[in-house]
Amino acid sequence: MKIVHRLYILLSVIIITASINLFLLLSTTQGYGAESNVTIGLYEIQTKSIVQGLLGADIAFLFLVLFSTTRSLNPLKSLTGALARIKEGKYGEEIKYESHDEIGLIIDSFNSMSKALQEKVEKARQHEIARDEFLAMITHELKTPLVPISGYADMMLKGHMGPITESQRERLEIIKTSSSSLLALISDLLDAQKLALGQLKFRKLENNVKSTVEKSVELMAPQAIVDKIELTHNAKDDIYTTYDDERIRQVINNLIKNSIKAVQPEIGKVNVLLEDSPTEAKISIKDNGRGIPKEAHDKIFKKFYQVDASLTREKGGSGLGLSICKSIVESHGGKIWFESEVGKGTTFAFTLPKIQQK
């Protein structure tokens, strides 16, 4: 029997018994004519007993309705919870319900929908993995011929393959610069694809964070000098922890490079700060550049997102750097974030879980 029909029957019984009660109560208020007091008393007692019995039946039926309704609504609570989990991206959940009433039909429809969603999400995930693997392969193949191009251009510029004219030097400089930029872009693409596939390998060893910061600043110093920007750091104390030195330097280099692009020559300042705490090392890169607009804050770590595309085209960049930085830091168990105010500058910071200091 359907739930709605059951509820209708129970409610009808309650209404009928309530009507009988009302009729009997009204009857007791009528005059009793010339009947004796004894007869009237017995009649009142009998009527009262009947009314009490029917009231008890009313109450019992009411509880029965409440129980039946509550039991019928319990699956709806399960359905609400399952829908909330689907909203969070958890597909494929199945709700157990054996009755074939209205709620049973709803539950069957939900189970079918949940299964279909899971299958579609799984297919999309497989397609995405295949796409990422293809892109990783293509990116690797593109990188292979660029290495000798850049290498031979460098050898010719240094005169290892004979003297060259000034005009040839200018053209070789263009070849070297362009191939280096393309190599950097391809390397970013390859890293991004490997991170997406979980194939980027880390060589985590015990390292000194101070030494890592110093190496990064030393590497980026020539670019800062060319751009007439003040680049400093405060790394003084040794802080030891386990991480991939090359990858963390990649993060620091990328953040310094972004800050150098964001500040103005002559007045630009980029400061790399190293802070120590009992549980982690914190590395911050602070600049006094143009800042990041608020509308870009929630997109800054997304792949290929660029705050200022025209500036990126002018100074180079793929829009992958910050996404890669975030993945590398999180793969080490750390966190990365930023604070920025337009016209005053930006500070990017990340943490590395720390082991006992030596």
Image (spheres, grey):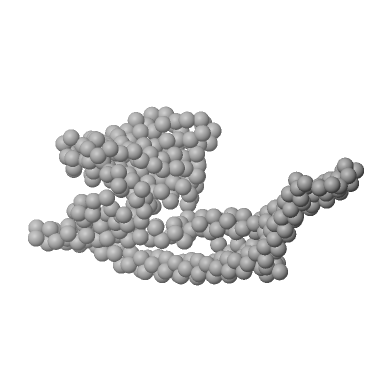
234, above or below 340, in the image: above
Q: Is residue 143 visible?
A: yes
140 vs 317, nearest the viewer: 317
Q: Tell me what residue is drawn at x 64 percent, y 62 percent.
A: 95
Reply above or below: 202 against 232: below
In the depicted view, which residue is nearer to us: 73 or 80? 73
Residue 222 falls left or right of residue 245: left
Instruction: From the top left corner, tell me how far across and down residue 78 is, in percent.
Output: 62, 56
Question: Is residue 242 left or right of 231 when viewed as pictured?
Answer: right
* Residue shown at 27% from the left, 50% from the top: 307
Q: Residue furthest right?
A: 38
Single out the residue that lies furthest toward the front. 34
Residue appearing at x 42%, y 29% in the figure: 237
Q: Kindly indicate the quadrant of the structure image that contains residue 112.
A: bottom right
Where is residue 211? Give x, y as percent. Answer: 40, 37
Vertical position of residue 89 compared to residue 216: above or below: below
Residue 344 point in image, percent of width and height: 24, 35
Please indicate whether residue 88 sits to the left or right of residue 8 in the image. Answer: left
User: Going 84% across and 47% down the picture, which residue do you hit?
Assistant: 34
Counting every numbered tag in the picture gives 0
Q: Is residue 159 visible?
A: no
Which residue is at the front of the view, 173 or 42?
42
Of residues 90 and 332, the one nearer the viewer is: 90
The N terminus - image quarter: bottom right
Q: Position of residue 28 (x, y in %)?
A: 78, 47
